[in-house]
Image (cartoon, coloured by chain):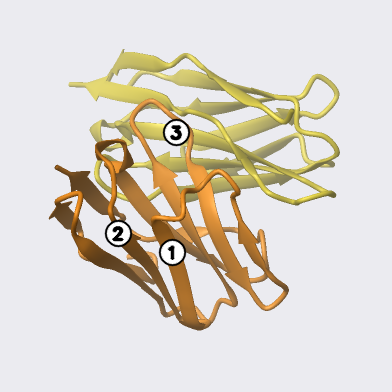
Chain colours: A yellow, B orange
Amino acid sequence: KNQVEQSPQSLIILEGKNCTLQCNYTVSPFSNLRWYKQDTGRGPVSLTIMTFSENTKSNGRYTATLDADTKQSSLHITASQLSDSASYICVVSPSGGSYIPTFGRGTSLIVHP
Amino acid sequence: ETGVTQTPRHLVMGMTNKKSLKCEQHLGHNAMYWYKQSAKKPLELMFVYSLEERVENNSVPSRFSPECPNSSHLFLHLHTLQPEDSALYLCASSHGQWGEAFFGQGTRLTVV
């Protein structure tokens, strides 16, 4: 069964600090992995998308990494801001079969001033 | 804004009511989706409409009925819901089935 596990479940950091969120998956065969940011009361917004051949991709202060061999991804947030407080969701899509993406439960990040 | 608009933003309904959720996308996409988001759970795919096919999650009860009159509009008709159906219902669209999904703001549904 395809699964996506995210850790930690929640995280509290001080403004200006860095943090790293983890995503482990069992989805196979693999097509792509996306990180979404979801602010409270809003829909998710895509941050990055990574395919099998990509190891790292940045979007401003967000940097995602992918290790397709170990089936792990991380999202690193640099110099956190209060507006980074949100849920971060990892989504992995298969390349065959039903093509239906599998969503993680998300990591809830709170940035304190 | 993401180009995907959902109405209403909030809805409270009794178990005997009938209501509909509406979604409209202005992105020229050809695939639209309904997702359910419950507290502490991953997003759950409910329905997909695209040129290729309609996909249904077989675990979705029949009290949820989708309608897609064209590629820009998607509805979710609700009837005789249960309290456990209370959740955030998200609409999304993409270019091509399973392309990058652009989500609406969601409808917060409370069933009393």
> Could you tell me which chain the residue with mark 1 belongs to?
B
Q: In screen coordinates, is B50 left or right of B36?
A: right
Which percent across, then down, holds residue A90? 56, 34
How far separated are the C-alphas under marks 3 and 2? 32 Å
Q: Quadrant of the C terminus of chain B?
A: top left
Which percent across, then down, holds residue A30? 81, 39
Regarding residue B6, the answer to whether it shows in the image is no
Q: What residue do we see at 14% from left, 51% from top?
A: B14
| B13 up-or-down from B74: above or below | above
Amino acid type shown at disc 2: His
Q: In screen coordinates, is B40 left or right of A54?
A: left
Q: Nearer the viewer, mark 3 or mark 2?
A: 2
Which percent across, then down, holds residue B71? 53, 82
| B2 up-or-down from A93: above or below | below
Q: Nearer the viewer, residue A69 or A25?
A: A25
Dot 2 corresponds to which residue? B79
Dot 1 corresponds to which residue? B65
Q: In screen coordinates, is B103 left or right of A81?
A: right
Whether the residues at callouts 1 and 2 have beta carbons within 8 Å, the answer is yes
Whether the residues at callouts 3 and 2 have beta carbons within 8 Å, the answer is no
How far separated are the C-alphas under marks 1 and 2? 9 Å
Q: Nearer the viewer, mark 3 or mark 1?
A: 1
